[in-house]
Structure formats: C-alpha cells, structure tokens
Image (cartoon, coloured by chain):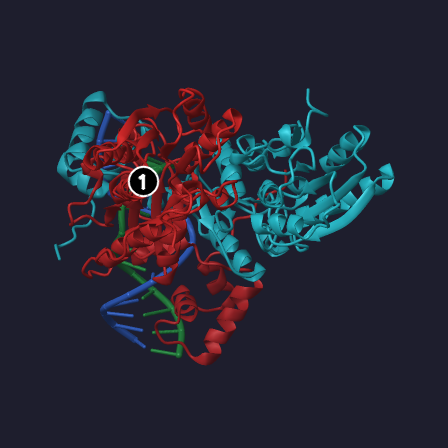
Chain colours: A cyan, B red, C green, D blue
Amino acid sequence: MTVSVPPPTSRDVARLAGVSQTTVSYALTGKGTVSAKTREHVLKVAASIGYRPNLAARSMRTRRSGRLAVVTGVAIDNQIRMLTGAGEVASGAGYVMETHNVEGTAEDRTERVLELATGGQYEGILTFVPVLPVALGQGESEPPVVAATAFDDQMRSVGELADASLAEVFVSTLAAAGHRRFIHVGGPEQYASARARRDVYLASVVRLGVESLGVLSGEWHAETGRKAVLSLPEDAPPLVVVAASDVLALGVLRGAAERGWSVPGDLFVTGWDDAEFSSYTTPTLTTVDVDFREAGRRAMRELVATLHGEPLPEAAAPLHRVVWRESTGELGRG
Amino acid sequence: MTVSVPPPTSRDVARLAGVSQTTVSYALTGKGTVSAKTREHVLKVAASIGYRPNLAARSMRTRRSGRLAVVTGVAIDNQIRMLTGAGEVASGAGYVMETHNVEGTAEDRTERVLELATGGQYEGILTFVPVLPVALGQGESEPPVVAATAFDDQMRSVGELADASLAEVFVSTLAAAGHRRFIHVGGPEQYASARARRDVYLASVVRLGVESLGVLSGEWHAETGRKAVLSLPEDAPPLVVVAASDVLALGVLRGAAERGWSVPGDLFVTGWDDAEFSSYTTPTLTTVDVDFREAGRRAMRELVATLHGEPLPEAAAPLHRVVWRESTGELGRG
DNA sequence: CTGAAAGCGCTTACAG
DNA sequence: CTGAAAGCGCTTACAG
C-alpha cells in the first residue's frame, strides 16, 4: 500500500502564496477584489500544487451546489429515455444531474429521498418512483422534492405514460377497414398500462360492435405472444391481434410463423412502444410511439421552474403517436 | 411563493432537548456514552421536529460518506447492464452508488472526474469512460479513481468487452459443416469492437481457405444490414453472413425477406449481443452473448478492493458465449 | 454520563 | 486591495 496524501486545501495555497485564505478565495471565485498581479500569482500557485476546491465545503457555506438528484428504479429502457430527457433540461439550466437508483419498499424509497433532500448536497430532487407524502415538500420544503411519478412500486408506468386511448384508434380504424374479429394479447394485470390498454380495447370492440375472442394476458415477454397464437383455434383467422407491447407483438409474429399463418393476411397485428426492432421485423410492426424522453424533459422542467420560483410549464403535445406499418396491411397507412 | 424554512440542525435538537450538541450527536450516532434516558429523550425530540443530519457536514468531519460515484456516458443499453452489475457489488459492500453521465471531450470528462474526486463527497470513483492520466490517482490519490474503461471517447466498447475471438468459432464451425462462401456485415470503422470482429472474420476465412465476398460496413443500424443484402448479386446464395451485431443481423433478415431468400437455406446468419428480440425473430438468431453485467460487477469489485486495501480480484469466466439458433441451420447446434 | 471547544474546508461581511 | 474572524452543520478528543 502506498501512503495516501490528503488533497491540498485553500489554506495550503494561501500559505504557499504568502497571502490570506480570503485572498485565495477571491482570486479563485472571481468575487471580492484582488489585484490582477495577486490573482495571477495565487492561480499559479494553486495550479502548481493541483489545488481543487472541496465542493462539499463550498456548498455547505454557500448553500448552493448546482446539483440535482433524480431518483429512479432499476434501470430499464423506458427510464433511460426519461433520464436522457431530464438530463438535457438540467444541464440546459446549468445544473449537474445525478442519478440514484433505489429499490425496496415505499418506506425504503421515502427514506432515501429524505436523505437526499436533507443531506445538504442537492438543490432539488426529482423522483420518478412513488414515495410517501412525508417526502414531498408541501411547497415550503428546502430543497424542493418534485414527484414525477412515471413508475409505480414495481417500476410500472403510470400516469400520462400509461395512457391507452390510442388503442381505440387501432380498433376503430381496422373495423372501418372491414375487420370483424379481434383479440387482445395483454401484459400482467398489475400494470396500470396493461390494464388501461386492455380496458380501452374491450370498450372499443363493444362500442364498434365487432367480435372479440377475448383477452390473453401474461408476462411482458415475447413468449406470452407466441403462446397466445399457438392456443388459437385453426379457424381463428382472419383476426386482428391488438398486443399491449411490441415485444408481445414480436412473439405473436413468431407464433404466426410457426403456424404458417401470414401477417398481414391471416393475422393483422398491432404493438405498443415503437421498439428499435419494430421497423425491421417481417412484417414491420404497427405500433404506438411513446415519448419517454419528452416526459423526462417535462418532469425536469417542473423542478427547475420550482427552483426558480416560476410558474409550472403547461404540458404541450401528446406523448403518444400511432405508427402504421406492414403488420396491419395497407389500411390506415398514409 | 411560500416561505422556505431551513431544516432543523443538531443544534436545534440540542436546544429543545436541553442538552449539548455533543450529547445529541452521541445519542444519534450511538457513539460516545449517553444514559438510556437521555438518549431516548433526544431521539424523541429529534423525531418530533423531523431532524435529519446534514450528510455533507457529517462527511466533511468524518471523511467518510459511504458514497461511490460511477462515471459513464450517454446511457445506452450496454452501459445500463454494466451499471446494474456495479450497483449490485457496491450495495453489497455497503456503499451507495451514484451515476454521473458525462459528455464532451476527454478534457471535459477528466475535469468532471477530478471534480468528483476532490469534491470531498465520494470515497471512490469508478469511470467507464476514458479520462486523461492526470485524473487517475497514481495509487496514492485519495479518493481512489479506478478506470474500468469499457467504452472509448465515443462510448464505443473497448477492452475485453470488445473481444471478438468468437467470430472465429462462427466461421470455423460453419466451414466444417460444409459452407464455402462468406461475407461480413460490419459496424463503423471507428469502433474497436467493429474492427475486432471484422479482423477476426478476415483472418478466419483466410486460415480456413473459404471464399469471402468481403466486408460491407456502415452504422450500427438495421438499415446497414438490409442494404448489404439488397446489394448482393443474384447468385450470391448459398452464403453465410457474419454480422457484427444483432441489430445488423436483423436488417439482414429483413433484406433476405425482401429478396425472397430463405434463412437458413439461401442465407445463414450470425449476429452479436444476444439482444432481447433475437430469440423471437423468424428465424431466431445465432449470436454471441456478452455479459456486460458481469463486467460491471468486476469493475466495482476492483474499486471496493482498492478501498479496502485488498488484492485485486482475478477475472474468472469469459464474458462471451456463443448461442446457436435457427439462423445458421441445424449445424453447430447441441 | 455530559459539555465546551476545536476543526473539517470553504466563503463573506466587516475593518483596515 | 487585503486580512482576521465568524460560521455553514456536524463529530470527537478532552475535561469535568
């Protein structure tokens, strides 16, 4: 083991430069008044010993750290996209954003957020995961904690991100094109997004008076979609399969291939998410693009607005958009 | 705007409890000696006003924060997997891990790492992106900065993760099964991983004396694979396509479908990465599984070992593994 | 068992 | 233009 030497402090710089700590601080921060000559000398000495200010000490004194924390859960693709958007806004506003991944119960997460809020190192906190009300400043807390709850206890999408109204567009457009038989392949019951897509599907088939073979649900895994198709009766086609995700839809395509059913033709398939692979499968997948990145931007804008004492920005464009591709045939395209 | 009230300090607790700040500290940290009665009283008062210690102040005094920083680039899937592995090891060792995403030049990144290292809030720093040597403690620095450079300037895999030796297994196994004509669909030249896979491919076809139609490279996008297939002469099949990634291979499958070529049969395809979709395309994709998560674990183990003054752990199992699937036909399976 | 005092590394009125 | 001193919120020898 080598001996570890403590990093130099502003006091060290002062001693070596033959000036006071005050002067060092003034020279370095550009505040106060220092003669050009003194400042230059101090800067040179500081550089020569590799001095760098201890940010924790500085922020303890100034109560400004320029750092914001984002709390989220296990890193999955959707959350990454939100983080990217949040990061854009944070650095645009001059802040450094740090990410904390938390796990455990609501109590664990709340504890962690409180720790961050009172730890004295962040100017604001944005949480993507739900926490108990005690962690949410009632507007008077310092620093502010903004909850942009995009994911629930189990990191499942909730809120606007779980909006499923576009499922109705799939059903009504395809019904208008003459399709008469539908089925839904859904995600796990516990997911707000899975329930919402299923509910909108069910309401739509009833409203439009088309036949529904029902709902087949399972894990968010391609195997669920594949198994669903394999379980269909031989005379099921022609059939529209409204899947709750692109991964599920991918499994549906696979199941269709295994049964020798053509898509489009025997089956017509829709997904959800606009995954990277969805524009290159054969056939390409009709889906819904969900703008998680924009959702992240909006959340961070809210935190920054709170910090600046500005009014909260209004949400603008919708986060969802239908993308028509080959898996639903020509109808609805263009 | 509501008035923001500063959070209570240990001094506030002391005043309210009618004891000294010292006693508050002892009661809260469990250090020192306090009578059970006093401690209970202090704890009650602290809880009643919602007191929480300022962690920045504490760590400034104790020089222990229990926090580790990981520096990485734009969050992409591979890095997420490494972060997951690193996080497992960090919390297993009792640390809180925070993530910093940095962008910009080597100088920018180095600056950021130095800031983190000297900022006084982390006990150790692990960087997945390359930084200038000045940021890497020469063993005597405090806190330690460990470089587990998994990605280069442009967030491209390097080092062990860019190992491509298994590309040889694809070529030799398929050659042994009677295949005589090959082609490589590669990623961008600037990527160490793309160059490595291409080089191993080229060396393998020469060594085995099979025909190679050459190398077609482009962006890491499915379109590159699709275009490559569309550009082939009509009499190219039967042909083995060794693609440098699953996304590229997906494009190859798409291109084959557009030309009416069967896979396997006319084309035999291999990918790289074992993407989520690769086991559900038609045909499923033969590929290489790369264990980014384990790479993250190893990197964090190195940092923790450094902190504890323990010898660095030896790397064990290889990070790469071939997965044979339908796209290469029956040969090589099982 | 308890408390007064010093100090972690900074910044910032306030004097000179 | 420069410096001595106080203080941000904690912890920890050291006395009592």
Residue B190 position, x and y percent, is 29, 27
Residue A276 position, x and y percent, is 51, 34
Residue B272 position, x and y percent, is 37, 40
Residue drawn where x is 44% and y is 52% of the image: A119
Q: Which residue is mark 1?
A: B178
Count of numbered circles on the image: 1
Q: Nearer the viewer, residue A134 or A76?
A: A76
Q: Nearer the viewer, residue B91 or A212?
A: A212
| Horizontal side, residue B223 vs residue A244: left or right | left
Q: Which image quadrant: the C terminus of chain A?
A: top right
Q: Which image quadrant: the N terminus of chain A?
A: bottom left
Q: Is residue B315 above or below residue D15?
A: above
Task: Residue A274: name its quadrant.
Answer: top right
Residue drawn where x is 40% and y is 36% of the image: B268
For mark 1, name the chain: B
Q: Is residue A203 visible to us here?
A: yes
Crowding near the residue tagged with mark 1, few <14, some 14–19, many ≥20 C-alpha atoms within 10 Å? few
Q: Nearer the viewer, residue A136 or B37?
A: A136
Q: Is residue B93 above or below residue A28?
A: below
Residue B90 position, x and y percent, is 35, 57
Task: Residue B2: name its quadrant.
Answer: top right
Residue type at tag 1: Gly
Task: Residue B154: name its quadrant.
Answer: top left
Residue drawn where x is 72% and y is 45% of the image: A184
Looking at the rendered structure, the secondary structure element under dot 1 is loop
Q: Nearer the viewer, residue A226 or A132?
A: A226
| Horizontal side, residue A292 vs residue A43: left or right | right
